[in-house]
Amino acid sequence: MTRALKAIVAEISACRVCADALPHEPRPVVWVDPRARILIAGQAPGRRVHESGIPWNDASGDRLRDWMQLDRETFYDKRNIAVAAMGFAFPAR
């Protein structure tokens, strides 16, 4: 991973911009590898993703993998698929 990409991932992982507005500690979820040819960009992680730290680890992820015709092993190989969200942390309710 390049120094610039490492810096971006570190900045996202450390993001606490919304900490005062959440009832829980923010847990940004971003999976990146420079070899990935596909980036899946979602809105914000859901509760299950927040708890597990695994992106698309819920019913929407099952649907997405089905649409893409990818099994979990292929989808979660960071060399294949990078995952980021527009909102880095679970927003809660």
Image (cartoon, helix red, strand yellow):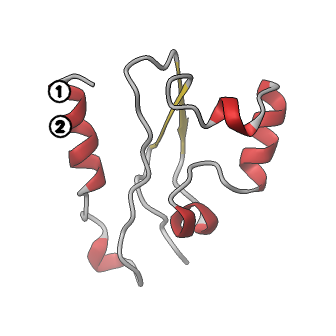
Q: In the displayed structure, does residue 82 sit left or right of residue 11?
A: right
30 over 73 or under it: above or below? below
Where residue 59 appears, as percent x and y from the top left, is: 78, 55
Q: Are marks 1 and 2 in contact (CB under 8 Å)?
A: yes
For the residue labelled by badge 2, is the local secondary structure a helix, a strand or a loop? Answer: helix
Quarter of the rendering containing residue 25: bottom left
Q: For the image shown, how many numbered marks are present on the structure?
A: 2
2 over 78 or under it: above or below? above
Q: Residue at x 69, y 36 (%)?
A: 73
6 over 86 or under it: above or below? above
Q: In the displayed structure, does residue 79 sit left or right of residue 15?
A: right
Where residue 7 appears, as percent x and y from the top left, is: 17, 37
Label 2 Cα neighbours within 10 Å, binned few <14 / some 14-19 / many ≥20: few
Where residue 19 appears, as percent x and y from the top left, is: 29, 73
Q: In the displayed structure, does residue 48 sit left or right of residue 89?
A: right
Quarter of the rendering containing residue 49: bottom right
- What amino acid is found at the position of numbered circle 1 in the picture? Ala
Q: Residue at x 31, y 67 (%)?
A: 18
- What amino acid is found at the position of numbered circle 2 in the picture? Ala
**Disc 2 marks which residue?**
7
Quarter of the rendering containing residue 58: bottom right
Q: Residue at x 61, y 37 (%)?
A: 76
Farthest-out residue, bottom? 23
* Quadrant holding the C terminus: bottom right
Q: Residue at x 77, y 28 (%)?
A: 70
Task: Give me the C-alpha separation between circle 1 and circle 2.
Answer: 5 Å
For the residue labelled by badge 1, is the local secondary structure a helix, a strand or a loop? Answer: helix
**Disc 1 marks which residue?**
4
